[in-house]
Amino acid sequence: MSESFGRLVGVGVGPGDPEMLTLKGLRALEEAAVVFVPVGDAGEVGRAEAVVRAHVDEGKVRRLVFALSADEAAVVRNHREAARIVADALRGGADCAFATIGDPNVYSTFTYLARRVRSEVPEVEIRTVPGITAMQDLASRSGTALVEGAERLVLLPFIGEAGLLRDALFSGETVVCYKGGGRMPEVARIAKEAGRFEGAVYGARLGSEGERIGFLGEVEGTLPYLSTVIFNGKAREFDG
Amino acid sequence: MSESFGRLVGVGVGPGDPEMLTLKGLRALEEAAVVFVPVGDAGEVGRAEAVVRAHVDEGKVRRLVFALSADEAAVVRNHREAARIVADALRGGADCAFATIGDPNVYSTFTYLARRVRSEVPEVEIRTVPGITAMQDLASRSGTALVEGAERLVLLPFIGEAGLLRDALFSGETVVCYKGGGRMPEVARIAKEAGRFEGAVYGARLGSEGERIGFLGEVEGTLPYLSTVIFNGKAREFDG
């Protein structure tokens, strides 16, 4: 019975540079009959799609709306509708890929989508192909060694309460903060309190048009939601 | 003056599967005149080399000894000798790549090597190309979503004192433990104390000969130093 269904693969396409895709990810995109890409109203818009279009025929690319909205009900509707479209394609026997920026197992829309698709089509085979995360790309582009020896790394999104970032920064280890673009003055203030402001590296739209990379202290103006800050005290050691 | 030197790039080649290399990493290996690979006495032996040999002509591959020895003095001698060899090649004008398993900015030998090369040849241009980490590959192969929503991720090596792993596990977030292969009974005991043993996912030699993936509770026998354990309580959600 399940033999007749298509398979679903979540492909991490990296932060935006089409060359940051893995060979395995490229093959997954090539082998899929349909490649779904998320489109929305935030920084994620078009970045996964841009990477996909650099590699595969546009005729098999299909857009799915994933608004990064504050409206919870709208988000749930988006997810449900997207899952229904993907489930229909899988029931029709098409092998499907879903392209996601970064890695499909790290703060990815794919996790939600896959869970809903699974509830619609329990028999379907779902797998993922890892992708380079913004944290890794920013470390590389800024010449920053993230962790070495016995050091710990803490990765957290700056959503919800600010105390978690403060605790992590005071602990003294390498801290990577995602999604703080809309509240960067608050991130900067907490970093100063913890003595971690100097040397903190900021990045957004890595490998894409409008790329921004610099010290947190140099950052000004309106910033994308999908911003990354690395705190580790050894930033800019190499050329990036 | 610096125009006459070659450039050095640390290329993350992923955990072992030759397809886990990025397109950018592949290009860096192809463009380099010399591709250095670490060889040693532990699990790292030959894995970076195997990925490199799958992609480039073996005539430009050169081995550097990096014993993962307990003998500190031997390690320092290895690093110094390796840096001298790389620095000589750069002074001779050769563009050099150094292939490292995983990512060159995450617990990588490349960080040490680059620092020593920089001290020998201060003018040299050093950059890195990110690579898929074992954490990401194990998440994918085991069908595990690492983090979603507001969750935090803590990555730490199980070297030195055990208290850091215990603290991380008790905090309840996603914890990834590297390098615990030689002390897995201790890791398992701490995980049980913290109520995080069930569902913990173990992996080693990912994408290579002798690959091992399973629940921590299923693991037996002698394990490689480079072992990875993911604690997140939602393991095996997808097919991997």
Image: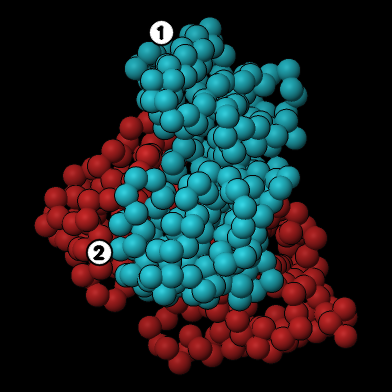
Chain colours: A red, B cyan
Label 1 sits on a secondary structure element that is loop
Residue B61 in the image: above or below residue A136: above
- Identify the mark at residue A165; answer none if there is no mark: 2
Q: Nearer the viewer, residue B223 or A108?
A: B223
Residue B215 is drawn in which quadrant?
A: bottom right
User: Which residue lies at the image location 38% right of the left edge and 20% below the top edge?
Assistant: B73
Q: Chain of mark 2?
A: A
Residue A206 in the image: above or below residue A93: above
Give percent across and percent down for residue A30.
77, 57
- Identify the mark at residue B135; answer none if there is no mark: none
User: Which residue lies at the image location 34% right of the left edge and 17% below the top edge?
Assistant: B119
Residue B108 in view in this figure = yes
Other residues around mark 1 within 10 Å, as few (<14) / some (14–19) / many (≥20): few
Disc tally is 2
Question: In this rendering, would A140 be left or right of A101?
Answer: left
Question: In this rendering, would A43 be left or right of B52?
Answer: left
Residue B35 is drawn in which quadrant?
A: top right
Question: In this rendering, would B93 be left or right of B175?
Answer: right
Q: Chain of mark 1?
A: B
The three-letter amino acid code for the residue at tag 1 is Met
User: Which residue lies at the image location 38% right of the left edge and 71% below the top edge?
Assistant: B194
User: Which residue lies at the image location 28% right of the left edge and 50% below the top edge?
Assistant: A173
Q: Nearer the viewer, residue B90 or B211?
A: B211
